[in-house]
Image (spheres, helix red, strand yellow):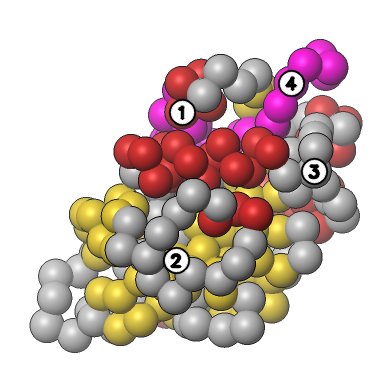
């Protein structure tokens, strides 16, 4: 891997790989999209993207023998959208328990949207912000773009919340592992700042 690479995007076979790459292009950051264990291990930062269903994405990661690779990373790691759900212990997507990466303690649950349409799709505000390097320059009330039907409950690992029928974790952190339930690559200035902050972690 070239020394100048700022981040490796894990090739999860999902549809937002190109848009995530374009977001890093806009920040002037260099990246690789890879399933190669050596490339991922040697990356300064690793991003796990995702669109779609947890069972499908976990099958891709298992077939590529990337589950133990991701579980043993010590550099900054961030999962976004479905990628955030994959970093938890399990997901109940599809009405059954789906074993995920187990990098953050807890389970992904169906989002209780009450009388609101499901999935949760569109712009929503961030709140209850914790003090963390990932959130430098982010304020309560800033908007991010969400598309999801499942979410992580609020817990000790929550860095920011959002609300759609119920309050849920919009951003989490456990150790070196972060998650954003929204799409930072589609979240305008808010998302760009979070990705910029991620690129500065570990420096």
- Say the numbered circle drawn on residue 23: 1
Task: Give SS at disc 3.
Answer: loop
**Residue at the spot x=61%, y=22% of the render?**
29
- Looking at the image, tell me whether mark 3 or mark 4 is earlier in sequence order: 4
Q: Quadrant of the N terminus?
A: top right
Which image quarter: residue 98? bottom right
Q: Nearer the viewer, mark 2 or mark 3?
A: 3
Q: Viewed as shown, does residue 85 lie left or right of 40?
A: left
Mark 3 and mark 4 in contact? Answer it, CB < 8 Å: no
Q: Viewed as shown, does residue 178 lie left or right of 189?
A: right
Q: Which residue bears the numbered disc 4?
A: 5
Q: Which residue bears the numbered disc 3?
A: 202
Q: Give the x, y percent position of residue 39.
A: 82, 28
- Looking at the image, tell me whether mark 1 or mark 3 is earlier in sequence order: 1
Disc 3 packing (10 Å; few <14; some 14–19; many ≥20): few
Q: Viewed as shown, does residue 4 lie left or right of 151?
A: right
**Residue at the spot x=71%, y=59% of the render?**
177
Magenta stretch: includes residue 144: no
Magenta stretch: give its range. Answer: 1-22
């Amino acid at each position: 891997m070239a020394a100048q690479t700022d981040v490796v995007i894990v090739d999860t076979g999902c549809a937002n790989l190109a848009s995530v790459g374009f977001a890093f292009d806009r920040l002037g950051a260099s990246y690789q999209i890879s399933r190669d264990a050596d490339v991922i291990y040697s990356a300064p930062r690793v991003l796990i993207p995702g669109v779609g269903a947890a069972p499908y994405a976990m099958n891709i990661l298992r077939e590529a023998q990337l589950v133990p690779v991701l579980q043993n990373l010590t550099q900054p790691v961030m999962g976004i959208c479905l990628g955030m759900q994959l970093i938890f212990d399990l997901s109940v997507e599809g009405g059954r328990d789906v074993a995920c990466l187990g990098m953050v303690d807890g389970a992904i649950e169906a989002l209780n949207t009450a009388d609101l349409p499901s999935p949760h799709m569109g712009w929503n505000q961030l709140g209850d912000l914790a003090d963390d390097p990932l959130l430098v320059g982010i304020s309560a009330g800033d908007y991010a773009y969400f598309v999801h039907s499942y979410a992580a409950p609020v817990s000790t690992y929550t860095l920011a919340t959002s609300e759609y029928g119920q309050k849920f974790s919009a951003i989490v952190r456990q150790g070196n592992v972060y998650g954003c339930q929204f799409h930072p690559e589609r979240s305008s200035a808010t998302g760009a700042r979070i990705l910029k902050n991620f690129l500065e972690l570990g420096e």
